[in-house]
Image: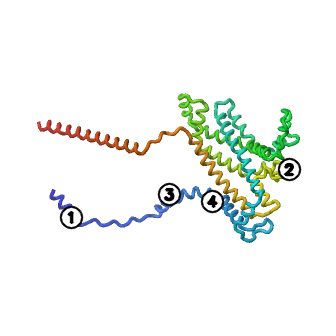
Amino acid sequence: MAALTTTESETGSAPPAARPPRKVGFSQKLSRWDVKVSPYLYISPFFILFGLTGLFPLAYTAVVSVYDWNLLGGQGDFVGLQNYVDVLNQPTFWKSLVNTFSIFLLSAVPQVIIAITLAALLDQNLRNATFWRMGVLVPYVVAPIAVSLIFGRLFADQFGLINGFLGVLGLDPVGWHSDRFASHIAIASMVNYRWTGYNTLIFLAAMQAVPRDLYEAATIDGAGRVRQFFSVTVPQIRATIIFVVITASIGGLQIFDEVKLYDVYGQGGSDRQWMTTVLFLYETAWGNQRDLGRAAAVAWMLFLIILVIGFINFKFSTRIASSGPKAPKVSRAVTRRLLAEARSAGAESAARRGDQQSTTTTDTTDRSDS
């Protein structure tokens, strides 16, 4: 005990000298930089390409929209928001906006519903499943000009196949090019024909990834096909539904090919009854106006509209995909009472275990003494 006291006093009188700072070698510094910088270098090509092909045109379009920029004369004076005001004062712009939303609703909503229904049917045990699954993709690979020619014959006013069929049924022919709503239905039919199969394969790929154990458990519980679709399939492919809804919304608001090729003139009808906003943008830039500043203003307004519609669709599709029976809510007072009861029960059990241990120790000591 005395020797230990002497040693402690000697150690306390002479504290150990501080160690000199350890030098970090170049290889260690390089290793640290590798850990910190390498992940950003690996993902940098995407952001560089996105900046060149996405952000820069967007920013440059915003710059063009605040200048008097003529197609032939080039950049002119700074006009601020005057181009936006001029566009908003044109009745054709508002008519094109209404046409865009009408065609968008007639195409996007049925397209998503039909696509997810076809995907659910193709997800079953079908004979020659690959043939049927690849067959839905055929309309997607057909060129837009061919689709326009085919549907132009179907929806022709005088000698169209559909009007001929209506005549056989004793119905009056429909003015597919003169009636505004009828022209929207015809254009939406072309859009649905081209893109429904593409979205069907996206839904089908997501459904193939759903664990089959969930369907087996649902079958054991007595759930039918419809119940399994809404309670198992839809919640499991929620992210895919959101992706398809947003991409369909963006494509529906940017529709141009089908509208441009619907008739031989490509101007959206004699009264602009099916002119969309993108076609109005095209006419503003390279049509009679030839004003790139106003066209850039139209592009930016369309971009903001797409952002708003995409956000609304995201919130709406998220709510639909996550809807279902919810667990009953428990108030905070009930939660606190349950926690207090659990703590008191735990304290009582701990005290009971302590008493048992002390009793066991006392018995052991008594036996040792005896």
Task: State which quadrant residue 360 falls in.
Answer: top left
Return the residue nearer the eye: 182 or 192: 182
Task: State which quadrant residue 19 falls in.
Answer: bottom left
Question: Can you name the residue that lies furthest to the right here?
Answer: 158
Q: Which residue is mark 2?
A: 264
List x then y, in percent, for residue 280: 77, 56
Looking at the image, how many numbered discs can be counted on the residues? 4
List x then y, in percent, for residue 177: 83, 46
Q: Which residue is mark 4?
A: 48
Q: Is residue 267 above or below residue 236?
A: below
Query: Which quadrant of the figure contains the C terminus?
Result: top left
Residue at 55% from the left image edge and 39% from the top image edge: 324
Q: The residue under label 4 is which amino acid type?
A: Ile
List x then y, in percent, for residue 258: 78, 48
User: Sequence-wise, which precedes: disc 3 or disc 1?
Assistant: 1
Q: Is residue 21 above or below residue 156?
A: below
Inter-mark Cα distance, 1 to 4: 65 Å
Inter-mark Cα distance, 1 to 2: 105 Å
Q: Which residue is mark 3?
A: 35
Q: Which mark is drawn over residue 10? A: 1
Secondary structure of the residue carrying numbered label 1: helix
In the image, which is nearer the foreground, mark 2 or mark 3?
Answer: 2
